[in-house]
Amino acid sequence: MRLRVIRPASRQSGQNQKSSLAIWLFLLMTTIGLTPFDSDAQGRGRGASTPRSDSLRQAQQLDTDGKHQETRAIFQALIDNAPTPADRAAVQRRMAMSYAYDGNCAKSIELEEQVISYWVTRREAEPQNAHYQEGEMANEAARVCIDAGALDEAERMYRRGSELGNREPEPRTHPKSLWDYRLAHALARLAARRGNAAEAQRQIAEATRILDSDSAMASAQRQYLPYLKGYVALYTNDLVTAERELTTAMNQMDNDPFMVVLLGMTYEKKGDQAKATELYQKAFDMSTGSNPPNVHSRAFTRKKLGR
């Protein structure tokens, strides 16, 4: 495979020039084979810095800074030169999150499906984990789509995630109740976004029933119930309930910037723009990770704050 590398334009200046030059040098090294791509897993395991792990960190920082085209150039080089299928899939997943900044549901699904295809190859070697990861990747794509407003595609991928996850063979490491709960949670949010308050409440009741039926599963998953109730209340204009439940959710899930965003949206709907802006700034500062809650929160609040 031949990679065409184009030198950055000399008329660029300042930080943009430095960033483009760094990417150009990275791509050039990749093309001529000077970058010793170590396994991501090995790098993480020994805590060492490698050219590949350094490039991943640089790409994530560029994504966080809103420089998505530059990020994707790095990711594509890492995909093209991945030393193992696992390394390739890991970067394809990161690329899917990069497109989530743009709300690009279709591209995120395309890339997550490539990751799912990798996990299909792992079914024989690690059947429980492989099926679980397939379901996770489908749900991750679904989350990108619901945040982008592509509700039909979100529902399709949430249902696909539940189906894939529930193919896990015995002895199962993730019970059917987990996937049933996640699907009811998703269907309630989708119903609220579609303006169907009655269906949203029916799905909340179903999610609660599933939690009550499996205390072991519920011990880790019950924290997501106030988020669900607050989300549905926000999108069905029950702002008193939304404020109460989302405040609880924000306190319980204090590392999730999306809870802060939702509470900010609630205050904005209530007409308290100062409080909303305060929460949007908090969420913007928090959202530096590479997963759907962080990515959507960063993109959403960047627009709200005029960054």
Image (tube, rainbow, N blue to C red):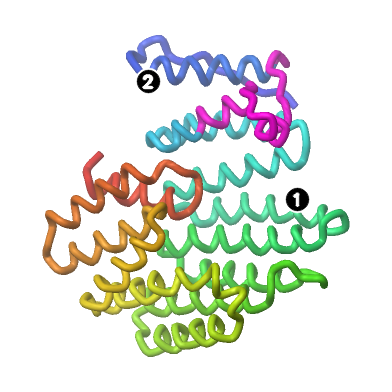
Residue position for label 2: 16
The percent coordinates of residue 236 (x first, y second) are: 29, 79
Q: Main secondary structure of the magenta part?
A: helix
The one nearer the camera, 58 or 207, is 207
Query: Image quadrant for the C terminus?
Result: top left
Residue type at numbered disc 2: Asn
Kind of element beneath mark 2: helix
Specify whether residue 33 is painted magenta: yes
Residue position for label 1: 118
Task: Determine the image quadrant of residue 6.
Answer: top right
Residue shown at the point (52%, 13%) measured from the top left: 7
Query: Relative to 188, does residue 6 appear above or below in the rendering?
Result: above
Residue shown at the point (62%, 15%) measured from the top left: 28
Residue type at numbered disc 1: Tyr
Relative to residue 68, is residue 212 drawn left or right?
A: right
Instruction: Please name which of the two marks, 2 or 1, marks the residue nearer to the observer.
Output: 1
The percent coordinates of residue 56 (x first, y second) are: 57, 31
How crowded is the residue under tag 1: few (<14 C-alpha within 10 Å), some, or many (20+)?
some
